[in-house]
Amino acid sequence: MRIIDRYIVRQTLMPFCIGLVVFTFVFIIRTLMDYVEPLVAKGVSSWVLVRVILLLIPQALALSIPMSLLLGLLVGFGKLSAHREFVALQACGISIRRLLLPVGFVSVVGWAATSYVMLVGVPESNQAFRELTFGVIADRAEGEVKPRVFFDDFPNLVLYVRDVPLSGGGWNGVFLADFRTQPRSVYVARHGGVIVDRQKQTVQLVLEDVFRHTPEQNEAELSRIERLVLRVDPTMLFPKGGPTKTEHEMSIAELRNKIAEHQAKGISTHNQRIAIYQKFSIPVACLVFGVIGLALGATNRRDGALGSFGLGIAVVFAYYVPLFLFPQMTKGGYLPPWLAVWLPNMLLGLFALVLFVWRDRVADQPIGLPAWLRRWRSSEKRPSIGTASPLRLLDHYIASSYLRVLVLTFLASIAVFYISTFIDLSDKMFKGTAPWYALFEYLFYFTPQIAYYTLPLAVLIATLVTVGVLTASSELIVMKACGVSLYRATLPMLLCAAVVGGLLFALDATVLGAANRRAETLRNEMRGLGTLTALNQPWMIGDDGAVYHVQGFDRLRHEFNDVNIWRVDPTMTHLLEQTFAQRAVYIGGEQGYSPATWRLELGWTRQFDARGHSNGYRTFPEEPRQLEEAAYFAQEPPDARFMSFGELQRDTTRLAASGLDVLEQQVALARKVAFPFVTIIMTLIAIPFAVTIGRSGTMAGIGVGVALALLYWGAISISVAFGAGGALAPTLSAWAPNLLFGAGAAYLLLTVRT
């Protein structure tokens, strides 16, 4: 390769790497939130966490490598065009066709890397990831049970413990309801634990100092057991044949065997055939993107790298939406599998060929806005800023440059999230399980949450790019020479960051919780999981420690069906009383009763003495009973995603007063206050970084921004997990990342030349 070829490859390498990190992170962020934070809270080793993250990366690389290749070419050639280097190449007789050599080299490398990921990396890493997570769950089964929270992951068993020592060694104060036999048995034990044998694939619950009660209407089976071992169905931890593979986790040979299997049974093989074709069609996108990146990027435009970034997002939409749209049409019988998978490459490849031929003939003509739109922009009156205006000309210049980058970065991030969401949910539309308007409604309600997470990243990148450009163009030096310090010059950015931080807090305090709830409801409906409803957990704990199990609840009439109430001795050595009623009606303050009065109908009550023996049994047609107010049973457990700060604070206080474990809610409460300050912290730490790397250009700023964002996100995840696990105080766990990065920002600001 000649010098010019190596130079072009180097120009595309930096934006390619940055795009690869950004796109990969966006695609795996949801899975990271689902797995990494809970694993940290369970105390798994750092090596296991690293392996989990590394095994998640290949499934995202299959999509992010072609996208990053296109971005790298567009930004690299955009930079050449902005610096007039492409004009110099044309003057030296180097045509677009000549540039196909370095572009082709980069595209072929991208094709080979994507092919390896699709054929080898994804099947192996996905299966290894599932086996690793299953192994962690099996090893930490005892730690899955949280104090004062009902645990029902063991099949047909419901477990409640009062205390889980941080040092391990089991649980103290155990209530266990066994639904595997009828009538159900209830166990109360002073101590308990779980034993998992991975070699024999067995799971056992071990209870010590046990009181066993199997109720009947007229009699009861009571027994005292010193040590009881209950076998648990191990399929939750050890599925038969190991973790089940999906099509994306199968090799081509396994997919072909599955096709033969389905054909013998008369089952559709569309999914398997599509998976095989995609292993070859997605890597070919690198070749198509290479031609498009050259044709669109090599122009005389002067809008540079950021303008090319916008073009790249548009082309990505044009490819990846049909890539996952057309295969769903196959399931409706509209397209054969091979055509559905290869059609996006055909259409975009035709567009790339036509565009390249046209650009080869008129390479000196820039690709820009239509003539009428350019005339409208040129005729648009620009506001004049007088000397008496509080907003000085320099502040206006810096703020406008900053806001342009901020808006572009924010919109690009939103677009990538939309693509990943569409890929995840579009199959439900084509299968007919959900209408199309549900997907667009979900995107509408999910947008506030996306904005909540992407605005801090946009603020960080906007600060780095703006200060970096000012430094690279020597404008910052001129400002200093005129007596404007670095602190004063960057004041507009800090004010904008503070406004964005206030917007984040206002978003969280107003629409975010309701929008997340509606988005989650729509997502569950599209996935066929039902909707969020009150009393979705039939097991509850009263303020006095009584255990309630309710079969059905009429919210309008405030009525329960088939109510069981167990009152347990505070030492958890025996039951005090069990009450059953076919119906319970809330009467509140009627007839002079207290607000927590219910009328139990057609039931019975059995009491027990200190030795666990039956101490009386009686039936009743109906009688008033002091339980809890109706609103207590109708409330859902607090979920920070669906609640504002005030709502979460009230519910956390109420649950803490009833003795429930609210550590996670306290961490989430403190996090709601701490997170909006990230915009100011990121701005303060970005300013000295940008001054240092300013000469390296825009893409260096974006690269540092992405690295800082990833570090901050990792710090949040680890800190919150430690807080949820009890290793850190809730307030400290929420503010620790801000304190850590704030201290770093203060040091850099005090050492940089102002």
Image (cartoon, rainbow, N blue to C red):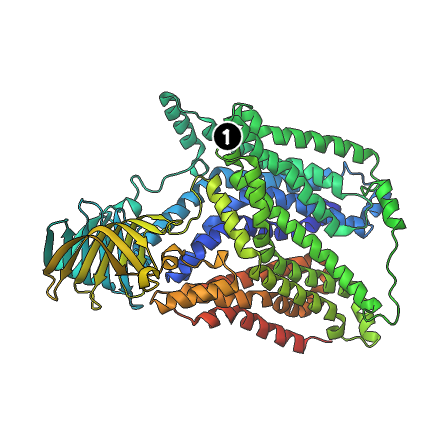
User: Is residue 333 in sight in this rendering?
Assistant: yes
Residue 433 x %, y %: 48, 34
Describe residue 530's horizontal placement relative to residue 607 as left or right.
Answer: right
In the rendered image, the residue lying farthest to the front is 591
Is residue 393 depicted above or below 257 in this figure?
Answer: below
- State which quarter of the image contains the C terminus: bottom right
Is residue 138 depicted above or below 346 in this figure?
Answer: below
Describe residue 379's horizontal placement relative to residue 215 as left or right.
Answer: right
Residue 381 or 271: which is nearer the viewer?
A: 381
Look at mark 1 in the image and give the residue it sits on: 274
Residue 331 x %, y %: 50, 27
Name the residue at 53% across, 61% down. Answer: 713
The amino acid beneath tag 1 is Ile
Name the residue at 68% across, 42% down. Answer: 314
Describe residue 753's horizontal placement relative to residue 191 as left or right.
Answer: right
Tell me where residue 160 sits by quadrant. bottom left
Tell me where residue 548 sits by quadrant. bottom left
Name the residue at 32% across, 64% down. Answer: 592
Residue 583 or 92: which is nearer the viewer?
A: 583
Residue 147 or 459: which is nearer the viewer?
A: 147
Residue 540 x %, y %: 32, 57
Q: Secondary structure at mark 1?
A: helix
Residue 631 x %, y %: 39, 58
Is residue 594 depicted above or below 108 in this figure?
Answer: below
Tell me where residue 512 sits by quadrant. bottom right
Badge 1: residue crowd in 10 Å (few <14, some 14–19, many ≥20): many
User: Is residue 206 in sight in this rendering?
Assistant: no
